[in-house]
Amino acid sequence: MRPQRIALHIDELVLHGVPSAHRHRVGEAVREELSRLLAEQGLPSGVDAAALASRLDVGAISVTPGASPEATGASVARAVYSGLAGGGQGR
């Protein structure tokens, strides 16, 4: 079986409570973790790409106070990945 090509574009990522100085590190961690999840697990079953085309809202994400930007980004990526299966209706 040939690997599936997946293109995911995140135009805007809104994270309240994350210092702006950390935005690039958080963003890179999101990209790395999402890439890893998609490479290892593929798309979650039940993904409706048409329904996700304009917006994916994964709801509130709990992050440990004082967590590194990398840990925050990884948590965000896992929430986005889970949100793909749920059609972006929150968690």
Image (spheres, helix red, strand yellow):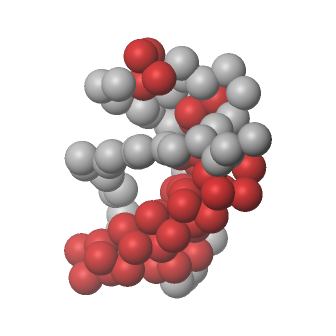
Quadrant location, the N terminus = top right
Does residue 54 sit above or below 42 in this rendering?
A: above
Report the side of 16 relative to 71 (left or right): left
Between 77 and 4, the one nearer to me in the picture: 4
Q: To which quarter of the image does residue 15 belong?
A: bottom left
Tell me what residue is drawn at x 55 percent, y 58 percent: 34
Residue extending farthest front: 1
Give the x, y percent position of residue 60.
52, 43
Tell me what residue is drawn at x 33 percent, y 46 percent: 9
Between 63 and 56, the one nearer to me in the picture: 56
Tell me what residue is drawn at x 30 percent, y 73 percent: 23
Does residue 35 sit above or below 86 in this rendering?
A: below
Q: To which quarter of the image does residue 2 belong?
A: top right
Give the x, y percent position of residue 86.
62, 25
Report the side of 5 relative to 46 (left or right): left
Residue 78 at least partly seen:
no
Does residue 11 sit above or below 16 in this rendering?
A: above
Report the side of 33 relative to 7 (left or right): right
Tell me what residue is drawn at x 54 percent, y 18 percent: 48
Give the x, y percent position of residue 83.
58, 35
Total labels drawn: 0
Residue 1 at least partly seen:
yes
Does residue 36 sit above or below 68 in this rendering?
A: above
Quadrant location, the C terminus = top right
